[in-house]
Amino acid sequence: MKPLEFFYRHSVFTRQEFLAEYLKGGDKSEYTANNVLAQHVASGRLLRVRRSLYTVVPPGLDPEKYSVDPYLLATKFADDAVVAYHAALQYYGKTYSIWHRFHYLIKGRGRPFRFRNSEFVAIQIPALLRVLSDAGGEIVEKPHLGGTVRVTTFERTMVDVLDQPELSGGWEEIWRSLEMVEFFDLDAVISYTLKLGSALTVARVGFYLEQHREQLMVEKRHLESLQAHRPKQPRYMGQKKKSGKFFSKWNLVVPEYILKRFWEEVL
């Protein structure tokens, strides 16, 4: 395949992806392929984001000022990288606040990486899910700006942000963002929640669903499926032990500012 043909079909790509196509037929060498990439970087057609990761720069645009899509980049940071948490909601256009920090899931470990005004942070997939062939499921691939983004579904994202609220801006941001989503497959939400094996997360998800029972068409069976796995002892909603109201149904102490939605008060 000719380089320009490859660039036309791949807006963001890794060196290995380019080699796999360019070396087909056996009449070219890896040395030549590396030279081709270097020449196109020098000409401004390609932008080298970091080692072995490139983006195609549209004709007429300055590589130094070209805004690279963060979701395409995050998907290419590892073979199994998945846009997740607040970044997943932001990809779907369902966040109250716009962030320039993008979390992505991988089975291994990764160091934070900054590119221009964006920061990319790798989060290791929970241990119980790492052993599963599908990493817990609820991951989809979406066509996006000439490439493909791997991202968690709405259902997995809901559970993930409630499981790790510190990665999603805290309770106000989570509540405001999730409430922008009109529909969840609740069977998928419950199935994924139970895979995490966290009683506290079960309680958080159950409480959230109960608080939005009418809007999300939550049925009694949904809540009962979760209630059977709630914590055996009372737990606080967050890591900080803030006083609040105790919900025996979930063995959960929920802060007053969530219950009374203090963020909606007009100052």
Image (spheres, rainbow, N blue to C red):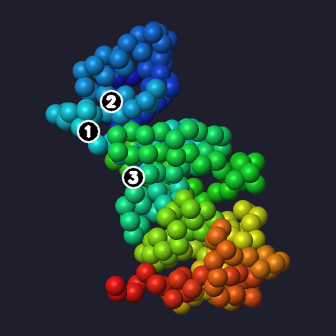
Left or right: 15 as drawn, with respect to 108: left
Tell me, yes or no, whether the two marked residues, 2 and 1, touch with CB atoms within 8 Å. yes
Left or right: 230 as drawn, with respect to 170: right
Q: Position of residue 141 (x, y in %)?
A: 50, 51
| Residue ID at (32%, 33%) | 56
2 or 1: tag closer to the N-terminus: 2
Q: Residue 113: in sight, yes or no?
A: yes
Q: Which residue is mark 2?
A: 47
Q: Residue 218: in sight, yes or no?
A: no
Tell me, yes or no, whether the two marked residues, 1 and 3, touch with CB atoms within 8 Å. no
The foreground one among 148 and 92 is 92
| Residue ID at (57%, 85%) | 256
Left or right: 7 as drawn, with respect to 179: left
The foreground one among 208 and 193 is 208
Q: Position of residue 212 (x, y in %)?
A: 55, 85
Q: Nearer the viewer, mark 2 or mark 3?
A: 3
Neighbor class of circle 2 (other Cα within 10 Å; few <14, some 14-19, many 20+) is many
Going by the numbered disc 1, the residue's amino acid type is: Tyr
Going by the numbered disc 3, the residue's amino acid type is: His
Query: SS of the residue at dot 3?
Result: loop
Q: Position of residue 80 (x, y in %)?
A: 59, 42
Q: Which residue is mark 1?
A: 66
The foreground one among 111 and 197 is 111
Q: Nearer the viewer, mark 1 or mark 3?
A: 3
| Residue ID at (74%, 51%) | 127
Going by the numbered disc 2, the residue's amino acid type is: Leu
Residue 100 circle label: 3
1 or 3: tag closer to the N-terminus: 1
2 or 3: tag closer to the N-terminus: 2
In which quadrant is the C terminus drawn?
bottom left
